[in-house]
Image: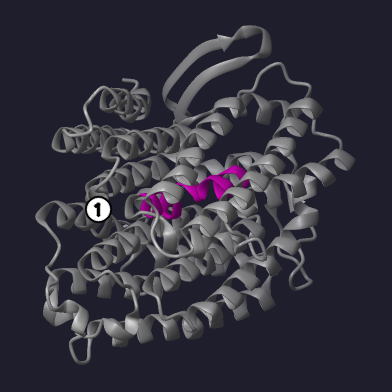
Amino acid sequence: MDWLLIIVLLPLLAAAAVGFIPDSQRRMIRGITIGASGLSLLCALIAFCTFKVGSGLQFETKVVWVESLGLHFHLAADGINIGIILMGAIVSFAAACCADDITHRVKEFHVLLNLMIGGILGTFASMDLFFFYFFHELALVPTFIMIGVWGRGANRNYATYKITLYLSLGALLALIGLIGVYVQTGAESFSIPDLIATVQESPIDESAQQWIFPLLMFGFGILVSLWPFHTWAPLGYGAAPTATAMLHAGVLKKFGLYGIIRVAIPMAPVGAQSWLGVLAWLALANLLFCGLVAVRQKDLNLLIGNSSVAHMGFIFLGIASLNVIGLTGAVLVMIAHGLLAALAFGLSGHLYRQTGSLDMSRMGGLLRQMPLAGSALLMVLLAGCGLPGFANFAGEVTIFFGAWAAGLKVVTVIAAWSALVIGGLYMMRAIRNILHGPRGDDWAKASDVSPLIATALGLLLAALLVFGFAPWLLTEGIKGEVTKSVLLPKPSAVAGQIQTTEVAGR
């Protein structure tokens, strides 16, 4: 059955349906949005459970759109994106449930929210280069509008302008790189599998790879908040509505990482060998610099935002290792971080609605006032430290092994120290300031999470634990795909440099 087609179409149809409903019918608007995202989640879960590892592309939908240009509406799942699609569906449902903080222009917000969800799910299900980029833009544009119109805080307008400029620049650089791939391959189709097959038979000229890969690396990297192009992220998430922050930080942000793994490395492997050493050091800057900035934060959203940017360093480091274990860990952390970031911003959004502030110095005693929300936040902060039992731990450890095997020993040691010391420092301080101590004055009229929000956030937490205790549910499929499609490096004799590679399977 074409599960992916149903998953993508449901939120888009919901956006159209909501558009015909009067703004006064808020319960119906929310019901349609939550129902559509819930059905998408159910279909994604069925697809994930019935997915057969090692059987190639599955749940395919392929329709010719513009035959003369080789454009096809092509949706399919393999070991790399099936887990990301499931994660995206879980986060989308949770975000729809947490959108009850919107009290004005409710219809317009939910139309944009459904478009964003449909774009996100379409992005990771697309196997056509054109629709891969199109769906991303379909999800990205509502982000700007939602922050500008429904955002919060004194810096809302500044945050909107900044995130728009940075992400537009990143998307433009990535688009130039993708066009370069299409032109240099001389292919007659935008199909990603066809392009990869063409490159394997007739590689792109090495001189062209040297400018295509950095365009894709920095273009996609800006979209992921690669240091030093990261400053838009904490500010944007702090100003965004709860549902928008959950979707963007949790899922849409992974577009750049997915693009590097799915497109950049297979299409320009020689360029990757030249630039991934640079990426490894930039990844370390993400971990160190953003981690130190997080230590100084007093606002919970800014703490979560800077922590989120710091965690991108782990994924970039896994990509820079350019081997099966490192890339497998990178995809695993993408999924784990998506669940964790959405859960963190969902909880912070609830706290903001209850108190009107996210100043951690005024939030003591949360566990006594809100035992359910407090316990969930405790687990979120511990998962952010890489505590065993959560999916983040399995992915981060895998990345460290992959980076060490690739010869990135200095980077690996510093990254591990950063994760254990700096990450532990700001998370433990947050636990002390928010959950314990005398009860803050802001809690006088605060109440715990509602059953609907508790269910949504509980799904995120349950997924983190399931994939933490059973990471092989994801890694078996991921490993098979990266082994087939990515150049595998031999261990390097020089720390921090990837010197030799071999084609997988030779």
Q: Indicate left or right for 235 with 199 as reference.
A: left
Q: Indicate left or right for 321 with 183 as reference.
A: left
Q: At numbered mark 1, what does the secondary structure look like: helix, strand or loop? A: helix
- Residue 151, horizontal then vertical, whole percent: 40, 54
* Magenta stretch contains residue 255: yes
Q: Is residue 437 above or below residue 206?
A: below
Q: Label 1, on which residue?
A: 101
Q: Indicate left or right for 357 with 492 as reference.
A: left
- Residue 389, horizontal then vertical, whole percent: 31, 69
Q: Looking at the image, which residue is at 59% across and 64% down?
A: 231
Q: Looking at the image, which residue is at 33% across and 55% down?
A: 242
Say which quarter of the image contains residue 1: top left
Q: Is residue 463 above or below residue 114?
A: below
Say which quarter of the image contains residue 356: bottom left
Q: Is residue 378 above or below residue 16?
A: below
Q: Nearer the viewer, residue 382 or 327?
A: 382
First to last magenta residue range: 244-260
